[in-house]
Every structure is written in structure tokens, then in C-alpha cells.
Amino acid sequence: MKVMKLLAVLIIPFMFTGCLDFFHSISIHDGEVDMAVRYTIQSALIDMLGEYSGEKIDIDDLLGEADSTIPEYEGFSFEAEPVDTSFHKGVEIHVNGSLDNITDDNSEKYFLPLKDGDHYRILIPSLADIEELDEMAAVFLSGSKYTMLVDLTGDLEGVKKVRLIMGNEVLGPDEKDSEILINTYGSSMLIEIPVLFLFYAPEDFYIELS
């Protein structure tokens, strides 16, 4: 089952609001992964959308459905915590476990940093087969980003280079028309990808850290 299409569960009903935030943090120490994936929606804009459409949007039901799609990788702990403030609603998923527990069960290991030789690869799901964007939806989503924060201490201390790999196509941050923006702040690396790229990507893609 292609789980971790969690992004789509949250995005589709609200893609016309442009009020989405995605945050993905990764840290590895002695083979132990500490990861969080957070999805939030701006409460005020959701309320405004409900008033405009005349239909009540039950964000809690939506997030409950999202929680049920969380994969359970063997040997990893999973915990979903609601985000509920006066400004945002959403969910933050915490994942912890040892890379030694990863099994080759032919399932997609979305969001997990997997070691591949001398580098790590993180599989990000394409949403191209979930919903076709019209021009207006694309305009509203144009400012939304998928943000990844990488802890450059521990096992990732030597990471200097980031590439986006999709099929035979390889994109670096310095290449023309690159879809990836990289900045390093002290012991942390910030990676940003337009949310639109996930909708237009014809297949799942990797973020490679080396």
C-alpha cells in the first residue's frame, strides 16, 4: 500500500487557500534516526473558506483521516501530535528508530534518510497522480514550500552537497531552473522545494545528501 500520501490528504481540500506549511526535520546519531514531519493549515483562512463556500470544514476529521495513513515501519516508533493554536491547525509526526532495522520489504520508505553507499537518500512522494491542478490552484500554491531541516552533527556531519534526483534527471541548487534552494546556518542545513514541484513531478523523487 502506498502510504505516506499523507500530504495529499491534507492538501487537496485546501489547495485553493495557499495556506499550507510543510516542515521535515532529520537528525541521525550513531545510526539512530530522529525525524519529524509537520503539516499545518492557517486556521483563519480555513474559517474564511468555510464562510465563503457556505460549508463547514471539519479540520479535526481531516486530520484524523491523515493520522490513519501513517505507516508503521518495523523497528521504528511513531507518534502523531495535533497542532492546534489560534493561528494553525495540523499534525506533527515524530519518527524514531535505528537504520539497522530497515527491512527490504519492497515498500516505499518515504521521508526516511536511508544510507546508500557514502551518501543518504530521502524519498519524497510525487502528488501528480492525486489531483490535477488548474491555473488558479497553481497560483495560490506558488508561495508554498516544502522545508527540510537537516542536523549537520552526528552521522550527517560531513554533508556538504545536496541533489534532487528524479529518474535519470539530477538537479543541483546551482543549476539553471533548479527546483531546490539550499542554505547552511551553523550546524543546520535548510532545504526548500516548491510545493508545486510535488504536484508536477511525474514520479517520486529523492533528496540526496553527500
Image (cartoon, rainbow, N blue to C red):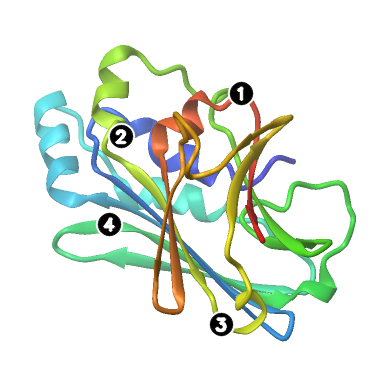
Q: Quadrant of residue 47?
A: top left
Determine whether, in the image, residue 102 is placed left or right of residue 193. right
The three-letter amino acid code for the residue at tag 2 is Phe
Question: Which labelled disc corresponds to residue 89?
Answer: 4
Depth check: give the residue in front, 141 or 130: 141
Pick whichever of labels 2 and 4 is earlier in the sequence. 2
Q: Residue at x 67, y 61 (%)?
A: 210
The answer to whether mark 2 and mark 4 are in CB contact below 8 A is no
Q: Residues within 10 Å of mark 3 (few under 14, many from 20)?
A: some
Closer to the camera: disc 1 or disc 2?
A: 1
The residue at the far top in this view is 135
- Mark-to-mark CA distance, 2 and 4: 12 Å
Q: CA distance from mark 1 to mark 3?
A: 33 Å
Front label number (1 vs 4): 1
Query: 117 and 7: which one is in front?
Result: 117
Q: Which residue is the site of mark 2?
A: 14
- Distance from disc 3 to disc 4, alpha carbons, whole Å, reads 31 Å
- Give SS at disc 1: loop
Packing grade of label 2 (10 A; few <14, some 14-19, many >=20) is some
**Separation of marks 1 and 4 at Cα, in angstroms:** 30 Å
Could you tell me if the residues under marks 1 and 2 are in contact, i.e. CB atoms within 8 Å?
no
Residue 69 visible within the image: no
Quarter of the figure with residue 133: top left
Q: Residue at x 63, y 74 (%)?
A: 158
Badge number at residue 153? 3
Label 2 secondary element: helix
Question: Dot 4: what SS?
Answer: strand
Question: What amino acid type should be assigned to the residue bearing mark 1?
Answer: Pro
Q: Amino acid at mark 4?
A: Lys
Which label sits on residue 202?
Answer: 1
Residue 144, percent from left and from top: 31, 41
Q: Are marks 1 and 3 in contact (CB under 8 Å)?
A: no
